[in-house]
Image (cartoon, coloured by chain):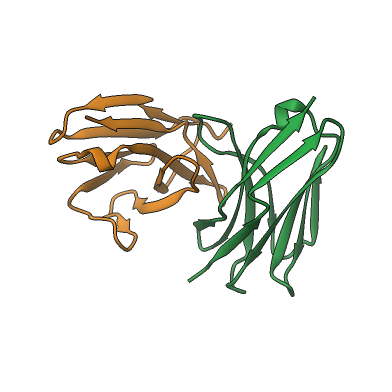
Amino acid sequence: GENVEQHPSTLSVQEGDSAVIKCTYSDSASNYFPWYKQELGKGPQLIIDIRSNVGEKKDQRIAVTLNKTAKHFSLHITETQPEDSAVYFCAASQGGKLIFGQGTELSVKP
Amino acid sequence: GAVVSQHPSRVICKSGTSVKIECRSLDFQATTMFWYRQFPKQSLMLMATSNEGSKATYEQGVEKDKFLINHASLTLSTLTVTSAHPEDSSFYICSAQGAGKQFFGPGTRLTVL
């Protein structure tokens, strides 16, 4: 079955800096890769996603890149703000079921 | 759009009792809903896939007789934790599939004493 590895587990950046979180997946049949932001005590919130027919997608300060050959995808957050502090999860999917990475706790210091 | 609600948000129960958690898609219809469990500082673990009008599909290691799932309509799925024990204490989160994406509810914190 699919296995998703996510790095780093924790990431601390200064406000205004960029943050990058990386994930690798094992099943080449996976074709959908969402990213979720989870604040403490809340459910995950979909922030951006990408499908396998696209290499890059951007939405304001966040972007996701996908390398199907290497089977890895990354989340990029630019101009980080304290409210970006949360746990971020990547996931891979084919046919609906999501397999999640282990999560990255992002801390943005003012 | 794509709002998913859960009720209750937190529940405390005695060991041996049953607890029902509701998951509703408020502004879209969801043929498929998913139930996850999350322990502190850990990732989301899929428990089961809930399909409207049919039996749920459980992940390996999840007891279907303990975690009863009913997806009676296109906007409602319920998870009943039967004969709850302290080790069932966790954060239970549902998601609803719409337009090829999964939207999550706010979660239910279950504490079994």
Which residue is depicted at the point 73% across and 73% down? A70
Which residue is depicted at the point 72% across and 70% down? A68
Is A67 above or below relative to B101? below
Q: Nearer the viewer, residue B93 or A22?
A: A22
Q: Quadrant of residue B19?
A: top left
Horizontal side of B24 relative to A65 (left or right) equals left
Quadrant containing the C terminus of chain B is top left
Q: Which of A16 and B77 is in front in this view?
A: A16
Residue A40 is situated, as x and y percent measured from the top left of the image, at 54, 30
Horizontal side of A98 relative to B78 (left or right) equals right
Horizontal side of A32 relative to B96 (left or right) equals right
The number of numbered discs placed on residues in the rendered structure image is: 0
Instruction: Residue B78: tell me if it is visible.
Output: yes
Residue A62 is situated, as x and y percent measured from the top left of the image, at 78, 42
Residue B82 is situated, as x and y percent measured from the top left of the image, at 17, 41
Q: In which quarter of the image is residue A81?
A: top right
Which residue is depicted at the point 17% across and 28% down? B14
Which residue is depicted at the point 47% across and 34% down? B105
Quadrant containing the N terminus of chain B is top right
Is B51 above or below relative to A26? above
Q: Which of B95 and A10 is in front in this view?
A: A10
Q: Nearer the viewer, residue A105 or B8?
A: A105
Chain drawn orange, letter?
A: B
Instruction: Residue B76: tell me if it is visible.
Output: no
Residue B54 is situated, as x and y percent measured from the top left of the image, at 28, 54
Task: Please name the color used to draw chain A.
Answer: green
